[in-house]
Amino acid sequence: MNAGPSVHTGREPELMFLTWMTCIADRLEHAVTDEQFTAAQRSGVYLAVCGHEVAAQPMICPPGLRCRACLRRVVAVSDRPRQHLSWWSRWLAGGAR
């Protein structure tokens, strides 16, 4: 799992961890938060940050193209300044520049 950028949830942005999963239905790779991944493990249908319900393809299959809506949402929020995090925290999260 990758340390991801913050994802907008209607509150102050916070650091979220994302997993990119390819959906069987549309063959696109969607960003799924760890919280959504954990919540949906029994059903096998995960809610992506773009709102798409992802029925994950087997992990032995190659990844699909990334969902543009997920990319826009993740990139738009990750470009916001993270003044509340120290340089060390950003570096640990993989966001040092």
Image (spheres, rainbow, N blue to C red):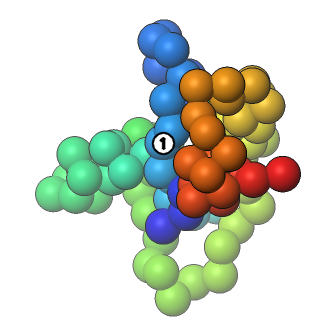
The residue nearer to you, when weighing 58 against 34, is 34
The amino acid marked with disc number 1 is: Met
Q: Is residue 33 above or below residue 73?
A: below
The residue nearer to you, when weighing 86 against 63, is 86
The residue nearer to you, when weighing 5 against 47, is 5
For label 1, the crowd category at 10 Å Cα-Cα, with few meaning under 14, some 14 to 19 and many 20 or more, is some
Q: Residue at x 68, y 45 (%)?
A: 87
In the rendered image, which quarter is residue 76 located in? Answer: top right
The answer to whether residue 57 is left or right of residue 63 is left
Q: Residue at x 33, y 43 (%)?
A: 36
The spot of residue 9 in percent (x, y) is 47, 20
The spot of residue 73 in percent (x, y) is 69, 30
Residue that numbered label 1 is attached to: 16
Q: Residue at x 51, y 52 (%)?
A: 18
In this figure, what is the number of numbered marks?
A: 1
The spot of residue 45 in percent (x, y) is 33, 50
